Image (cartoon, helix red, strand yellow):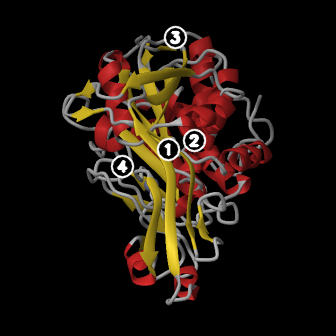
Amino acid sequence: MSFTSQNMQDLLESLYPICRSITGDGVRESFEILSKFIDLNVKEYPSGQKCYDWEIPKEWNISDGFVENSAGQRVIDFKKNNLHVMGYSSPVESVSLSYDELVEKVHVLNDLPDAIPYRTSYYKSDWSFCASKELLESLPKDDTYTATIKSRLEDGNLTLADAILKGQSKEEILISSYVCHPSMCNDNLSGVIVAVALYNWLREKRDRHYTYRFVFVPETIGAVAYLANHPECKENVIGGWVLTTCGGPGPIGYKETFLGDSFIDKITKYVLSKEIGDYKHYPFVPDGSDERQYSSPGHRIPVATISKDKYYEYDYYHTSKDDLDFVNGDQMQVTFELYKKCVDILETNFPYFRREPHCEIQLGKRGLYPNTGGGHKQLAGSSEDFDPVDAICWYLFLCDGENDLIDISEKAKIPYDYVRKLTQDLLDKDVIYRNE
Ligand code: ZN
């Protein structure tokens, strides 16, 4: 199926309520939903397994968590919002707290007093709650409170998944997103959903050149575990994109790969400059999402990111306000279209060689004078003003096995789609060929 913005909205609404973490049933439940749209291979790796410098942690699951007042009423309740309990909180059995003690155990946001913050403690045993500052301050200071967290931290598994779409080439493009955040939309459901949309669009595309490896992992530990357990990535993956925070109402941004000038950067920049113009450009830094792992020594896979309201930069980042009001299908559609364009160009942006590499090609004898109809200066259906004869002359002048189609489009100022059409015409007439 081809994903519409309504499909993305529906998927967002069905994934949003689930309490995900880096391990546990929330991830499995999310994969069950995603499996309706994508042929996922779900894989599990046991707690304690060594993955490079990391170790798979214990599996965490939670069924409930609350703070009660002395009347037995829940004043902070995991069942109302799963952000209320810090991720990976250890179990707590009815611990009695004064108001002052409670304050020590509840994270709030001073700058956003009506939002619940998102907090985790994956690698240090601890427990706490998160609440809006307004809620905490509204509680009577002379009351006593009881904290309970029904969580389990035990040997289990880390769950991740991939899906491969085979192409003609063994060379692979990585499309990676992460599945470890509880109820928040831009970070991280938007990345997962745009990846699923991209998968569905690519699956329909016939004659794919590249093989596409879609990866859904809990952030950091999941990417490390994936790379450690999939040595073939090192052989085959040549570049890709990490999909994150791509569904907010704010600006489009591009985080470059660690190389800054890889083929992925070239394509992403080309698409954004044509489609968006003044997008935000973020240089590579070794923080952010799973580009930290893919780009690292031993792997060095160039991966870029197109964001819409990039992590760290929007006010609602890692709070309960990154919700279904903040993100919607239409906003995700904008980024989906950009990624589609990138992949579309990736699939066609090759350098070609001329069969006759010397001097000019004689256009007339090969029937290469464009049939321009009435207009000489403007192509039917195109708003761009260029001369089709000039276009083919430029094309054949630049066609030397060095310039790819983006180079020809940029240097000759011809729209990419027209360069592509010319390429097909010249291939059909056996004037050019591609080194495979
Ligand atoms: Zn995050």
Horizontal side of 301 relative to 146 (left or right) equals: left
Numbered circle sitting on residue 243: 1
Numbered circle sitting on residue 256: 4
Residue drawn at the location 42% of the way across and 49% of the way down: 88
Up the image or down, 41 lies above or below 69; here it is above
Numbered circle sitting on residue 168: 3
Horizontal side of 366 relative to 255 (left or right) equals: right
Label 1 within 8 A of ligand 1 by Cβ: no
Which callout, 1 or 2, points to the residue nearer the camera?
A: 2
Rendered image quadrant of residue 419: top right
* Pointer 1 with pointer 2, Cβ within 8 A: yes
* Pointer 2 with pointer 3, Cβ within 8 A: no
Q: CA distance from mark 1 to mark 3?
A: 24 Å
Q: Amino acid at mark 1?
A: Leu
Comparing 299 with 221, the one in front is: 221
Mark 4 or mark 3: whose residue is earlier in sequence: 3
Residue drawn at the location 42% of the way across and 63% of the way down: 128
Q: Amino acid at mark 4?
A: Glu
Up the image or down, 391 lies above or below 41; here it is below
- Residue 46 image position (x, y, % from top left): 37, 24
Q: Amino acid at mark 3?
A: Gln
Rendered image quadrant of residue 76: bottom right
Horizontal side of 307 relative to 294 (left or right) equals: right
Numbered circle sitting on residue 192: 2
Mark 2 or mark 3: whose residue is earlier in sequence: 3
